[in-house]
Image (cartoon, helix red, strand yellow):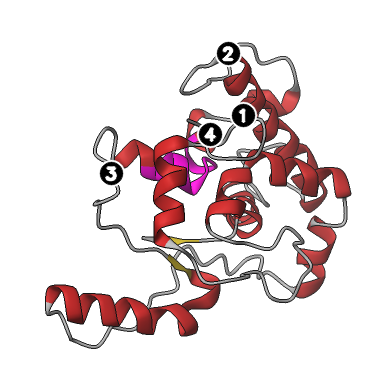
């Protein structure tokens, strides 16, 4: 399973689905902070209510009028998406291997080794496509820095995707040059998938 830094994922969704899109009113780069705020609010309401998902039944702001259930789906954390795909089937023996796209050069050789040694699939990987390419608004270094210049926005993303940052060992500083920290421990990720995150930032039991 290929995963991506939450900082990159949520900004990519905003750029691809919102930025300069005529069907959206809040479609300028300076609206990114507001977008993150409302995605974070949806997550907070879900945690407080105990619901597995939350829809915008009470749309009381202009931004809420534009947010859709698809936005909520596509901005779910990686662990939430994986849990949804493997409901009731995740165990220590589940053979899931994780690769962070920010570190393909460092982690693909290990994936190749796993496929070859465990499954006798020893063929070279094909070239990776550039999916969801948004040619209208190429992501520049200055754009990235501007989007993450608001500390409140950074903190909301850190809280919303706290499981992903911990499980996949991502940097909590969006401006840090190296976004990946240490090598992923697959057993640790399985623990996150099975037990989740509790109020003390430890595996829930």
Query: Closer to the camera: disc 2 or disc 4?
Result: 2
Position of 6 compared to 81: left or right?
right
- Pointers 2 and 4 in contact (CB under 8 A)? no
Q: Residue at x 75, y 46 (%)?
A: 32
Q: Where is mark 2, residue-wise?
A: 49
| Real-space CA distance between mark 1 and mark 3, rounded to the nearest whole angstrom | 26 Å
| Real-space CA distance between mark 1 and mark 2, rounded to the nearest whole angstrom | 10 Å
Residue 91: assigned label: 3
Q: Is residue 77 magenta?
A: yes
Mark 1 residue crowding within 10 angstroms, few (<14) / some (14–19) / many (20+): many
Query: Closer to the camera: disc 4 or disc 1?
Result: 1
- In the image, residue 126 above or below residue 96: below
Label whose residue precedes the other's in the sequence (1 or 3): 1
Query: Closer to the camera: disc 3 or disc 4?
Result: 3
Mark 4 residue crowding within 10 angstroms, few (<14) / some (14–19) / many (20+): some
Foreground of the two, 31 or 187: 187
Q: Where is mark 4, residue-wise?
A: 72
């Amino acid at each position: 399973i290929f995963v991506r830094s939450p900082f990159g994922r949520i900004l990519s969704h905003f750029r691809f689905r919102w930025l300069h899109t005529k069907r959206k009113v809040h479609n300028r780069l300076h609206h990114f902070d507001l977008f993150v705020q409302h995605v974070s609010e949806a997550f907070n309401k879900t945690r407080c209510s105990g619901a597995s998902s939350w829809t915008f039944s009470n749309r009381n702001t202009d931004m809420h009028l534009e947010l859709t259930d698809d936005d909520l789906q596509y901005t779910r954390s990686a662990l939430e998406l994986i849990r949804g795909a493997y409901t009731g089937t995740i165990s220590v023996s589940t053979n899931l291997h994780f690769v962070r796209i920010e570190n393909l050069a460092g982690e693909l050789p290990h994936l190749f080794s796993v496929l070859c040694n465990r499954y006798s699939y020893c063929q070279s990987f094909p070239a990776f496509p550039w999916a969801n390419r948004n040619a209208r608004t190429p992501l520049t270094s200055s754009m990235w820095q501007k989007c993450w210049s608001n500390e409140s926005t950074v903190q909301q993303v850190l809280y919303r995707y706290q499981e992903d940052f911990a499980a996949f060992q991502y940097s909590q500083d969006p401006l840090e040059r190296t976004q990946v920290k240490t090598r992923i421990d697959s057993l640790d990720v399985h623990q996150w998938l099975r037990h989740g995150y509790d109020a003390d930032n430890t595996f829930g039991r």
